[in-house]
Image: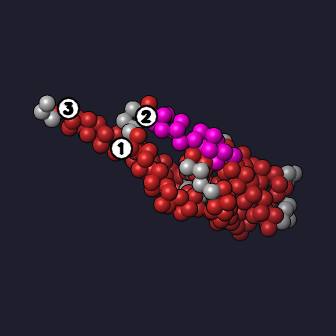
Amino acid sequence: METLGAPGAGIAIALENLFPPLPSEVILPLAGFTASTGGMSLWAALACTTLGSVVGALALYAVGALLGRRRTVALAARLPLVKVSDIERTEAWFSRHGRKTVFFGRMVPLFRSLISIPAGVERMPLVTFTLFTTLGSLVWNTIFVMAGYFLGANWSLVEAYAGVATNVVVGLVVLAIVVFVWVRLAQGRGRRDEPA
Protein backbone atom coordinates (compact mmCIF):
# COMPACT_ATOMS: atom_id res chain seq x y z
CA MET A 1 0.00 0.00 0.00
CA GLU A 2 2.87 2.36 0.79
CA THR A 3 4.57 1.52 -2.51
CA LEU A 4 1.53 2.03 -4.73
CA GLY A 5 -0.05 4.81 -2.66
CA ALA A 6 -3.57 6.15 -3.15
CA PRO A 7 -3.66 5.38 -6.91
CA GLY A 8 -2.75 1.76 -6.13
CA ALA A 9 -5.59 1.57 -3.59
CA GLY A 10 -7.94 2.93 -6.27
CA ILE A 11 -6.78 0.31 -8.78
CA ALA A 12 -7.24 -2.44 -6.17
CA ILE A 13 -10.81 -1.27 -5.50
CA ALA A 14 -11.57 -1.13 -9.24
CA LEU A 15 -10.35 -4.74 -9.53
CA GLU A 16 -12.38 -5.70 -6.43
CA ASN A 17 -15.52 -4.74 -8.34
CA LEU A 18 -14.57 -7.16 -11.12
CA PHE A 19 -13.06 -9.89 -8.93
CA PRO A 20 -14.99 -9.95 -5.60
CA PRO A 21 -12.48 -12.30 -3.91
CA LEU A 22 -10.36 -9.14 -3.52
CA PRO A 23 -12.22 -7.80 -0.46
CA SER A 24 -12.73 -4.06 -0.09
CA GLU A 25 -13.08 -4.75 3.64
CA VAL A 26 -9.31 -5.35 3.67
CA ILE A 27 -8.15 -2.84 1.05
CA LEU A 28 -10.01 0.19 2.44
CA PRO A 29 -9.01 -0.09 6.12
CA LEU A 30 -5.42 -0.77 5.06
CA ALA A 31 -5.51 2.43 2.98
CA GLY A 32 -6.83 4.26 6.05
CA PHE A 33 -4.08 2.83 8.24
CA THR A 34 -1.46 3.80 5.66
CA ALA A 35 -2.88 7.34 5.64
CA SER A 36 -2.67 7.46 9.45
CA THR A 37 1.06 6.69 9.27
CA GLY A 38 1.65 9.38 6.64
CA GLY A 39 2.13 6.88 3.80
CA MET A 40 -0.54 8.69 1.76
CA SER A 41 -2.98 11.56 2.12
CA LEU A 42 -6.32 10.67 3.69
CA TRP A 43 -8.17 12.75 1.10
CA ALA A 44 -6.25 11.08 -1.72
CA ALA A 45 -7.15 7.65 -0.29
CA LEU A 46 -10.86 8.57 -0.23
CA ALA A 47 -10.79 10.15 -3.70
CA CYS A 48 -8.82 7.36 -5.40
CA THR A 49 -10.76 4.49 -3.84
CA THR A 50 -14.06 6.13 -4.77
CA LEU A 51 -12.83 6.72 -8.31
CA GLY A 52 -11.74 3.06 -8.45
CA SER A 53 -15.21 1.97 -7.29
CA VAL A 54 -16.86 4.01 -10.03
CA VAL A 55 -14.52 2.72 -12.74
CA GLY A 56 -15.15 -0.90 -11.73
CA ALA A 57 -18.91 -0.30 -11.56
CA LEU A 58 -18.91 1.29 -15.02
CA ALA A 59 -17.15 -1.78 -16.43
CA LEU A 60 -19.89 -4.03 -15.04
CA TYR A 61 -22.57 -1.60 -16.23
CA ALA A 62 -21.09 -2.01 -19.73
CA VAL A 63 -21.34 -5.81 -19.37
CA GLY A 64 -25.02 -5.47 -18.49
CA ALA A 65 -25.63 -3.05 -21.37
CA LEU A 66 -23.92 -5.42 -23.82
CA LEU A 67 -25.93 -8.35 -22.48
CA GLY A 68 -29.15 -6.38 -22.95
CA ARG A 69 -32.73 -7.16 -22.08
CA ARG A 70 -33.38 -9.62 -24.91
CA ARG A 71 -30.46 -11.87 -23.98
CA THR A 72 -31.27 -11.59 -20.27
CA VAL A 73 -34.86 -12.72 -20.86
CA ALA A 74 -33.65 -15.55 -23.13
CA LEU A 75 -31.19 -16.73 -20.45
CA ALA A 76 -33.82 -16.49 -17.71
CA ALA A 77 -36.29 -18.51 -19.79
CA ARG A 78 -33.81 -21.41 -19.84
CA LEU A 79 -33.30 -21.45 -16.07
CA PRO A 80 -35.30 -24.00 -14.12
CA LEU A 81 -38.06 -22.52 -11.91
CA VAL A 82 -37.54 -18.99 -13.33
CA LYS A 83 -40.31 -17.40 -15.36
CA VAL A 84 -40.15 -14.51 -17.80
CA SER A 85 -42.76 -12.82 -15.59
CA ASP A 86 -40.13 -12.79 -12.80
CA ILE A 87 -37.85 -10.75 -15.05
CA GLU A 88 -40.70 -8.40 -15.96
CA ARG A 89 -41.55 -7.82 -12.29
CA THR A 90 -37.88 -7.19 -11.51
CA GLU A 91 -37.68 -4.69 -14.37
CA ALA A 92 -40.78 -2.87 -13.14
CA TRP A 93 -39.35 -2.75 -9.62
CA PHE A 94 -35.98 -1.52 -10.88
CA SER A 95 -37.60 1.22 -12.97
CA ARG A 96 -39.35 2.52 -9.82
CA HIS A 97 -36.49 2.08 -7.34
CA GLY A 98 -33.34 2.01 -9.49
CA ARG A 99 -31.67 5.06 -7.95
CA LYS A 100 -32.12 3.84 -4.39
CA THR A 101 -31.08 0.34 -5.42
CA VAL A 102 -27.82 1.55 -6.95
CA PHE A 103 -27.08 3.92 -4.04
CA PHE A 104 -27.76 1.46 -1.21
CA GLY A 105 -26.55 -1.52 -3.24
CA ARG A 106 -23.06 -0.04 -3.20
CA MET A 107 -23.06 -0.57 0.58
CA VAL A 108 -24.19 -4.22 0.67
CA PRO A 109 -21.54 -6.95 0.61
CA LEU A 110 -21.78 -9.23 -2.45
CA PHE A 111 -24.27 -6.93 -4.17
CA ARG A 112 -21.86 -3.98 -4.34
CA SER A 113 -20.50 -5.12 -7.67
CA LEU A 114 -23.45 -7.08 -9.01
CA ILE A 115 -25.92 -4.18 -8.83
CA SER A 116 -24.17 -2.54 -11.79
CA ILE A 117 -25.16 -5.35 -14.18
CA PRO A 118 -28.97 -4.95 -13.94
CA ALA A 119 -28.48 -1.18 -14.15
CA GLY A 120 -26.69 -1.76 -17.46
CA VAL A 121 -29.30 -4.25 -18.68
CA GLU A 122 -32.04 -1.71 -17.92
CA ARG A 123 -29.95 1.05 -19.52
CA MET A 124 -30.28 3.33 -16.51
CA PRO A 125 -29.13 6.78 -17.70
CA LEU A 126 -25.36 6.76 -17.41
CA VAL A 127 -25.17 10.11 -15.62
CA THR A 128 -27.72 8.94 -13.03
CA PHE A 129 -25.94 5.62 -12.57
CA THR A 130 -22.56 7.31 -12.17
CA LEU A 131 -23.92 9.86 -9.68
CA PHE A 132 -25.60 7.33 -7.39
CA THR A 133 -22.71 4.89 -7.69
CA THR A 134 -20.29 7.65 -6.70
CA LEU A 135 -22.39 8.72 -3.72
CA GLY A 136 -22.94 5.15 -2.47
CA SER A 137 -19.28 4.25 -2.98
CA LEU A 138 -18.13 7.40 -1.19
CA VAL A 139 -20.21 6.51 1.88
CA TRP A 140 -18.96 2.89 1.94
CA ASN A 141 -15.33 3.80 1.30
CA THR A 142 -15.34 6.62 3.86
CA ILE A 143 -16.64 4.32 6.60
CA PHE A 144 -13.93 1.72 5.98
CA VAL A 145 -11.03 4.09 5.26
CA MET A 146 -11.82 6.13 8.38
CA ALA A 147 -12.13 2.95 10.46
CA GLY A 148 -8.63 1.94 9.37
CA TYR A 149 -7.39 5.49 9.96
CA PHE A 150 -8.65 5.63 13.55
CA LEU A 151 -7.90 2.01 14.47
CA GLY A 152 -4.29 2.39 13.32
CA ALA A 153 -2.30 -0.80 13.81
CA ASN A 154 -5.54 -2.60 14.72
CA TRP A 155 -7.04 -1.91 11.26
CA SER A 156 -7.49 -5.64 10.61
CA LEU A 157 -10.31 -5.71 13.20
CA VAL A 158 -12.51 -4.09 10.56
CA GLU A 159 -12.30 -7.20 8.38
CA ALA A 160 -13.47 -9.43 11.24
CA TYR A 161 -16.59 -7.34 11.88
CA ALA A 162 -17.27 -6.86 8.16
CA GLY A 163 -16.98 -10.63 7.73
CA VAL A 164 -19.90 -11.09 10.13
CA ALA A 165 -22.03 -8.71 8.03
CA THR A 166 -21.04 -10.57 4.85
CA ASN A 167 -22.02 -13.89 6.42
CA VAL A 168 -25.42 -12.46 7.40
CA VAL A 169 -26.00 -11.29 3.80
CA VAL A 170 -24.92 -14.69 2.42
CA GLY A 171 -27.27 -16.43 4.86
CA LEU A 172 -30.19 -14.21 3.82
CA VAL A 173 -29.47 -14.85 0.13
CA VAL A 174 -29.37 -18.62 0.67
CA LEU A 175 -32.62 -18.44 2.67
CA ALA A 176 -34.29 -16.39 -0.09
CA ILE A 177 -33.19 -18.95 -2.71
CA VAL A 178 -34.52 -21.86 -0.62
CA VAL A 179 -37.87 -20.09 -0.13
CA PHE A 180 -38.06 -19.24 -3.85
CA VAL A 181 -37.39 -22.86 -4.89
CA TRP A 182 -39.85 -24.21 -2.31
CA VAL A 183 -42.63 -21.84 -3.47
CA ARG A 184 -42.03 -22.67 -7.15
CA LEU A 185 -42.03 -26.41 -6.51
CA ALA A 186 -45.21 -26.08 -4.42
CA GLN A 187 -46.87 -24.09 -7.23
CA GLY A 188 -45.89 -26.81 -9.72
CA ARG A 189 -47.35 -29.55 -7.48
CA GLY A 190 -50.55 -27.53 -7.04
CA ARG A 191 -51.04 -27.25 -10.80
CA ARG A 192 -50.45 -30.99 -11.28
CA ASP A 193 -53.02 -31.82 -8.59
CA GLU A 194 -55.76 -29.73 -10.22
CA PRO A 195 -58.42 -31.86 -11.99
CA ALA A 196 -58.12 -31.87 -15.78
Of labels 2 and 3, the one closer to you: 2
Q: Is residue 133 visible?
A: no
Residue closest to the far left = 195
> Nearer the observer, disc 2 or disc 1?
2
Nearer to us in this view, 196 or 49:
196
* Residues at marks 1 and 3, CA–CA distance in whole angstroms: 19 Å
Q: Position of residue 63 (x, y in %)?
A: 64, 42
Earlier residue among tags 1 and 3:
1
Q: Is residue 44 left or right of residue 138?
A: right
What secondary structure is marked by label 2?
helix
**What whole-number distance in Å separates the C-alpha atoms at marks 2 and 3?**
21 Å
Q: Which mark sits nearer the N-terminus, 2 or 3?
A: 2
Colour mapping: secondary structure
Instruction: Give the residues drawn in magenta, as a range.
Output: 59-77
- x%, y% of residue 16? 68, 47
Left or right position of 172 against 191: right
Residue drawn at x 20%, y 32% is 192
Instruction: Quickly name the residue at label 2.
Output: 77
Which class describes the residues within 10 Å of circle 1: few (<14), some (14-19), or many (20+)? some
Residue 174 place in picture, x, y as percent = 43, 44
Mark 3 nearby-residue class (10 Å; few <14, some 14–19, many ≥20): few
What amino acid does circle 3 point to? Arg
Q: Tell which of 20 and 127 is nearer to you.
A: 127
Q: Which residue is mark 3?
A: 192
Distance (Cα) linking label 2 and label 1: 16 Å
Residue ID for mark 1: 180
Disc 2: CA contacts within 10 A as few (<14), some (14-19) or many (>=20): some
Badge 2 amino acid: Ala
Residue 54, horizontal then vertical, whole percent: 70, 55
